[in-house]
Image: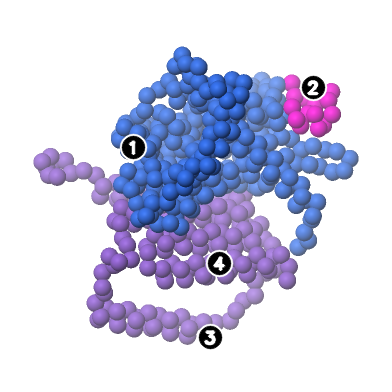
Chain colours: A purple, B blue
Amino acid sequence: MGVYEIIFWFLTVVALSCALGVILSRNPVNSVLFLIATFFAISGHYILLNAQFLAIVNIIVYAGAIMVLFLFVIMLMNLNADTEPQKNRLVQIAGAISGGTLLLVILAALRTSTITTLDQTSTDIGLIKNLGKTLFTQFVLPFEISSVLFLSAMIGAVVIGKKEKENPLAP
Amino acid sequence: MQLDIAFIIEKVLLISVILLGSLGIAMYATWAERKVAAVMQDRRGPNRAGFMGLLQPMADGLKLFFKEEIIPDRSTRFLFILGPALAMLTAVMTSAVVPWGPDIVTENGVISLQVADINIGILFIFGVVSLGVYGVMLGGWASNNKFSLLSSIRAASQAISYELAMGLSLVAMLMMTGSLSLREIVEQQHGFWDGGYFTWNFFKQPLGFFIFLTCAFAELNRAPFDLPECESELNMGYHQEYSSMKLGFYLFAEYINLFISSTVIATLFFGGYNFPFMDQVAASVSPVLFAIICVLTLLTKAICIILFFMFIRWTLPRFRYDQLMRLGWKSLIPLALVNMVITGAVILWVIK
C-alpha cells in the first residue's frame, strides 16, 4: 500500500465517522464541529484528486463562512441535549418509514448500476487556471445564470431583513 | 509515490526555523508594544528585567506558565481547551505559503525558502483566516459566560464582515498579477523600478492597499477595531474565563497573527524580499549571503508594518460597534468594488 492509498483510506474513515458523528451526537454544537471535520476530510480528497482550487474553496465557503453562521445561531439559541423537546410518537414512526423507503430506493438504484472505473491518470482540470477557462468558455451561460440566482437571493435577503418604515412605533 | 528523506528533513528544518522565529518575534512584539506605548505616553515602560527590560517577555511567559489553571465548572471542558489551541494553530499556519527569500542555488541543488509553493497561495491564506474565527468563537461559547459569548459573537461577525472587503480589495490586485501564487507575485515585483514605473504593487494598487490594511486591522482585532476586547462594555472579552497559559496562548496568537499578517502585507504590496538595486547586490555576493540579505529585507519591512500597527493603536480611539459595521459594509465594500471596476478599465484600455 503506497502513501496515496494510506492517505485515501485515512481520509475516508475520518469523513465517514465524522459524518456519523453529525447525526449521532446529541449536542448541536458537537454536530457542527463534526460537520466541519467532515468538510476538511472531503477537502483532503479533493487535494488527492489534484483539485486544489475546489479544496480550498470548500474550506473557505463551507467551513469558514456557512458553518460559522450555523454555530452563531446554535450558540445564540443555547440548545442543549437536555432541553431537546420530546418528539411525537407518530412523527417518529413516519420518519422511520420515510427514511427506510429512501434507503430502499437508493439500494435498488445502486444494485443495478455499474461501477465505472475512474481514470488513474491525473488530470489538471481542478487547477484554477483550467477551471476558470472552462467555466468562462464552455459553461459560461450556466455560470452566469447561477450568479443571477445568487444575486436575486441576496436582494431577497436584504428586502426581508429591511426595517419597516411605515410604523415607527413598532418594536 | 516515493518518499524523499532529504526533502522531508529540509522542510522540517525550514518549518522549525520559521516557527521558532515567529514565536520569538511575537514575544518581542509584546515588549515593543509596551515600549511604544510608553514612549507615546511619555513613560518609561518595562525597564526592570534586563537591559531596557529586554528580559520582560521571558518573565511574562514564565509567570503565565506557573499560574494556576482554572477550568470553570459549568464550561464545556473539551471545547474550552480546544479554543486556544485552534487560535494558536491558525495563527502559525499562514506562514507556510509566505516566500521568505529567493531560492538558494548551490552546486548540490536548489534550496527553497518557502515551505509550500502552492498555486493558490492567497486563497490558502483566506481559508486559514476564515478558520481563525473558530478559536475565538469556541472559547467564548465554551466558557459559559455571557460576556465571553457576546464578545466572541462580535469577533466572529466583525471577521466575516471584513473578510468580504479584504477579498474584494485583493481581487483588483490579482487582476494585475494574473496569479494566485505568492512566489509569482513576489517575483513580479522584482527590484524597485522597471520599464518606467515602480514594480511594487503598492504603487499599482494604492486604494486596494488601504482597504486591505483597514481590513487587516479588523481581522487582527486591533485598535481602533478591538471591539471584542472592549473592556468598558465586555469586561475582558472572550478570554475572560481563561487563566494561565491558555490565556497566554490567546494573547500570543494575536501577536503571531500580527507578525504574519505584516509579512503578508509586505509580500503582497511592498515587494516581499525584493529591494532596490538587488541585481547588483546579487552579482557581487555569494548566493547564501544574498538570501540572508533578502530575508532580512523582508523582516525589516514586516517590522516597520508592525510598528505602524502599534502607532495606530496608541493614537486612535476605539470605534463604536455600529460605526465599525457601517464602515465595513457601506464604505469599504463599495470602495473595493469601485477599485475593481477602475482596475478592470485600466487593464482593458491603458495597459492592454
Q: Chain of mark 1?
A: B
Q: Position of residue B296 (x, y in %)?
A: 70, 28
The crowd level at tag 2 (other Cα within 10 Å; few <14, some 14-19, many 20+) is few
Q: Chain of mark 3?
A: A
Split into 4 quadrants, where in the image is the N terminus of chain A?
bottom right
Q: Nearer the viewer, mark 2 or mark 1?
A: 1
Q: Position of residue B47 (x, y in %)?
A: 55, 21
Mark 3: amino acid: Thr
**Along the viewing direction, whichever of B273 and B193 lies nearer the viewer:** B273
Residue at 84 percent of width and 23 percent of height: B284
Residue at 31 percent of width and 60 percent of height: A79
**In the rendered image, which residue does mark 4 sit on?**
A14
**In the rendered image, which residue does mark 3 sit on?**
A112
Q: Are marks 2 and 4 in contact (CB under 8 Å)?
A: no
Magenta stretch prevailing secondary structure:
helix
Mark 2: amino acid: Gln
Q: Nearer the viewer, mark 1 or mark 4?
A: 1
Query: Would residue A86 appear left or right of A54 to someone viewing this image?
Result: left
Magenta stretch bounds: B277-293
- Element type at mark 2: helix
